[in-house]
Amino acid sequence: MKNFILTFVAVLAGGLLSHWGVPWWGLVPVGLAAGWLIRNTPARGFAAGFLAGFLLWGIWAFALDHANEGILSARIGMLFQGLGNWTLILITALLGGLVAGFAVLSGSLGYDLAFPPKKGPYARRRRRR
């Protein structure tokens, strides 16, 4: 549980820092680094990354929507056959969660590929001669 919270906080803090001056994919290197450096199971790593990305992008989209009084999201919603402001914010949050979750998952699985675990479901068994 400690590593889950640590991964969540690392992705959230790194994602907040990467919002200034970095494109939307700035969350990916942060998630890769968190997945590589903080040991989690792949499922817990994905969940922590997804939750952090979901909250980060959802709150950021809400803040931007609130800053311009919903004018831009209403126009974008009309392009997508009348979607509401909250629906667009939810879609944005889901996309952010998927980006961060898959980044952390890739970092975790990349570490397991580079340094295979000694025990567990991925460990190789020695053949007896």
Image: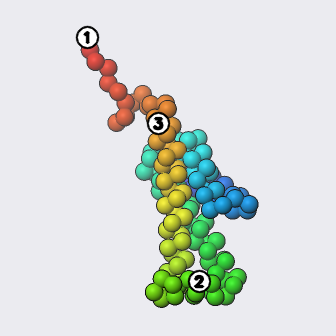
* In the foreground, 20 or 40: 20
Sort mark 1 into few (<14), some (14-19) or many (20+) by Cα contacts within 10 Å. few
| Separation of residues labelled 3 and 2 (CA atoms) | 41 Å
The structure residue drawn at horizontal position 58% and vertical position 53%, both measured from the top left corner, is: 28
Element type at mark 2: helix
> Is disc 3 surrounded by few (<14), some (14 to 19) or many (20+) residues within 10 Å?
some
Q: Give the Cα separation between the discs numbered 1 and 2.
A: 67 Å
Location of the C terminus (image quadrant): top left
For disc 1, the marked residue is: 129
Q: Determine the residue located farthest toward the top in the rendered image.
A: 129
Front disc: 3 or 2? 2
Residue at (54%, 71%) from the top-left corner?
A: 92
Label 3: which secondary element: helix
Q: Give the numbered dot on residue 73.
A: 2
Residue 58 lies, in percent from the top left, at: 58, 71
Disc 3: which residue = 112
Extreme residue in the right direction = 21
Q: Is residue 63 left or right of residue 55?
A: right
Mark 2: which amino acid? Ser
Tell me if residue 119 comes above or below residue 127 in the rendering: below
Residue at 62%, 77% in the rendered image: 62
